Image (spheres, rainbow, N blue to C red):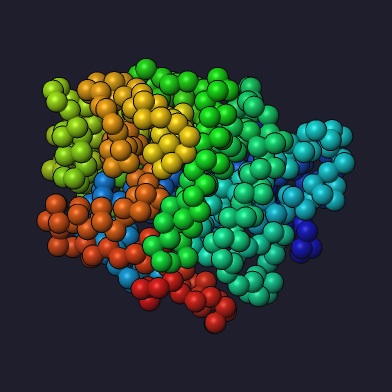
Amino acid sequence: MDKKVYILLLILAAASSCSKQLDQQPVSSLPTSKFYTNNNDFLQAVNGVYSQLKNYPEQALFLGEMRSDNINAVSDGNRDWDGINNFSPNITTVGFISNAWKNNYNGIYNANSVLEALASKGDVIGNAGLATRYTAEVRFLRAFYYFQLVRLFGPVPLIDKPTTGEGVTTIARSTVKDVYTFIIDDLNFAAANLPKSFTGSDVGRATSYAAKGLLGLVYLTRSGPSYSIDGPGLASNEYEKALVLFNEIISSNQYSFLNDYTSIFSYSNENNKEVIFDVQYASGINGAGFPSHLVPVAYWTSIGIANTYGNGYGSSTFAVTKSLKTAYTNNVTSGTDSRYAFNVATGYTKSPFIKKYVDITKKGTSGTDWPINFIVLRYTDILLMKAECILNGAAGSQNEVDDIINRVRIRAGVNALSNVNLSTLLEERRREFAGEGLRWNDLVRQGTAVTAINNWIAYDALINVNKMVPDYVIYPVPATEIQAKPDLYTQNNSYY
């Protein structure tokens, strides 16, 4: 088969699972012989680059939320996530880890293929502005996938053109600093060339504010400590750069702070004013599996639903930790934090669990067919990251920080605070974003991952979880990648 046709078929296969909002023609009706001859061909190819986003929720929940002190999963057998939850050094063959590497690089491969085609044949689109927008969308997505890789694995191969087979086995891992330089260049281009918003069937595409928000998070992450490893933190002190971007989003008036926390995640209120960027799903077309990820099968059984709505892990549990429950109960002088009842289910099974995205009235045909989007970046996160920048020395006042955190707390029905510090802010983020996959990256970014995890192990009196060490800030390179070309990659420290 011709190599170019093979590349196009890969893109088309990815496009078949793109979002409900990104209108697309059925794959079967797109002959490869006519590919890249008109605008519609390019539109479908760009949609194909979006398609790898469907794997992001699994990474966020199983490699993020479960890795944190929010979840303590208890296995009923030898489960793929055991070593992730337990900080095992022997997780190089775990499917979640190898899939994260593979899926992000599939997204990068598709992005590079489309960018190459835009450069050589983009004139057939017939609209220079639209061709530039497509380029900006694809570069945003490529940056997104690389940012995931850096946060998960540290140094990774930097590939900027379509490369397969033997070509891949000659590319060594680049330093985190070099990968960040590449990410920042892509996001600056995206921020400058994407529209402020989309309407109609284009809702869900990356906007200039999504690019600015992600770039701000990149600067914030780079500014975190290094843990003496080549991980996502470079101690770069770029809080001012991040703050400028967050302020641009806030002053744009494109987004707003919803007064009702539950409405942010409502099935009937998707793409609301809180949402800056999300992964799009639709039941029967491209249904979501993430609402079931951290929900035990026993829950579905208890409410009379066959366990086809389970997560495929039998009687395993995904218990919310005592530490997280205490974080909700100890932050109020009276009453309760309304976010706990929405985020966490109690009374159905022996242990409470995350049920944030479950609305039984909206269930699809299976446990992987929920019609709800996964929010990647929302307005409240922008506000709290602004406060984080200020507390780390960027321009701003304590009053601004207190106002932001109290806006969040008042929405949750809890008392206001004064003189908020980084520790208090981190705990507020924990309560606000429980179940959204942010907690682990927050701990790493703030330099508290080792202390917080070891404190949680002691607080919850866990005997199945290994001691957290700095090397575990990142995951191991998958064994399949190490074995593909001996001596090309060196395994991350403390893993085997």
Q: Position of residue 133 (x, y in %)?
A: 73, 36
- Is residue 403 rendered to the left or right of residue 285? left
Of residues 11 and 453, the one drawn nearer to the viewer in this rendering: 453
Corner quadrant of residue 190: top right
Q: Position of residue 172 (x, y in %)?
A: 60, 72
Corner quadrant of residue 109: bottom right
Of residues 251 and 260, the one drawn nearer to the viewer in this rendering: 251
User: What residue is at 62 percent from the left and 49 percent from the top?
Assistant: 184
Residue 163 visible within the image:
yes
Which quadrant of the figure contains the C terminus?
Answer: bottom left
User: What residue is at 22 percent from the left and 58 percent from the top?
Assistant: 454
Q: Is residue 232 above or below residue 280?
A: below
Q: Position of residue 46 (x, y in %)?
A: 69, 42
Please, which residue is most extreme toward the bottom here?
486
Corner quadrant of residue 438: top left
Q: Is residue 107 above or below residue 205?
A: below
Of residues 361 and 42, the one drawn nearer to the viewer in this rendering: 42
Q: Is residue 418 above or below residue 469?
A: above
Residue 34 visible within the image:
no
